[in-house]
Image (tube, rainbow, N blue to C red):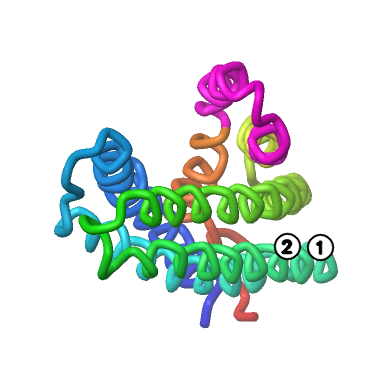
Amino acid sequence: MSVRTIAKITGWSLVAMAVIAGISLGYAYEEVFGAIQAGAVGDFMLFQVVLFGLLLTVILDFTVSFTLYRFFKNNNSVISLISMMLRIIYTLILIIAAFSLINSWDILNTDQIAVVANFERFMFIWTGGLIIFGFHLTLIGFLMKIHPGINKILWMLTIVAGVSYIIVHALKAVSLSSEQWVKSLEMILMLPMAAGELGLAIWLIVRGGKGPSTEKK
């Protein structure tokens, strides 16, 4: 498989994950959980969207773990391997977290206390995984730095995104009494967190694998 093909697969997979996450976790999850917390009936169809979105995300995350390694391994095989393993570990944690939601399948509208506990457990486990994801993204930023042809702003933005993930989600995991200011910090860092990986995705689709380094790996 050519480097160009690997770049396009990775880029489009990252874009697809961003769209899927926006729908399933950014919208559907918040709607279902918000309704349950308010004592209303949870929308089972939206709950299915959440679970299906998580399934697709897991598949794409495993794909990107491998293709990013293939794309950057000639730049630094050790860092590429470590970054791949970190993303795989993150994805496995996401799977474990998802089982907390699956446990709510039969009791979504019959046991509000248990469902709220399941949703909160999902968020707690996923938060821990996102810390590891931040380390993965930081290493990808360093790989982008040493890869020829990647703009300085882009790799710096990716490193900032990785560090932001680490800081925000580490604070979420330990600052139970400071939830509001952690949310404020997350809002401030949301732009680099989103732009880092999305910027890499666009670069991979448009320019990744082009030029003299497009030999097959």
| In-image side of 16 versus 122 (left or right) | left
Image spot of residue 112 (x, y percent): 31, 50
Q: Residue at x 46, y 69 (%)?
A: 99
User: Which span is picked out in magenta?
Assistant: 165-192
- Tell me: residue 125, above or below residue 66: above
Q: Name the residue under label 1.
A: 79
- Tell me: residue 212, above or below residue 203: below
Name the one closer to the observer, 3 or 48.
Answer: 48
Image spot of residue 170 (x, y percent): 71, 39
Q: Quadrant of the C terminus?
A: bottom right
- Tell me: residue 174, above or below residue 204: above
Q: Residue at x 74, y 50 (%)?
A: 135
Name the one closer to the observer, 134 or 43.
Answer: 43
| In-image side of 65 versus 6 (left or right) | right
Q: What residue type is labelled 1?
A: Ile
Q: How crowded is mark 2: few (under 14 residues within 10 Å), some or many (20 or more)?
A: many
Say if residue 166 shows up in the picture.
yes
- Check contact, mark 2 vs mark 1: CB within 8 A: yes
Q: How crowded is mark 1: few (under 14 residues within 10 Å), some or many (20 or more)?
A: some
Q: Mark 2 points at which residue?
A: 83
Residue 38 is one of the magenta-drawn residues: no
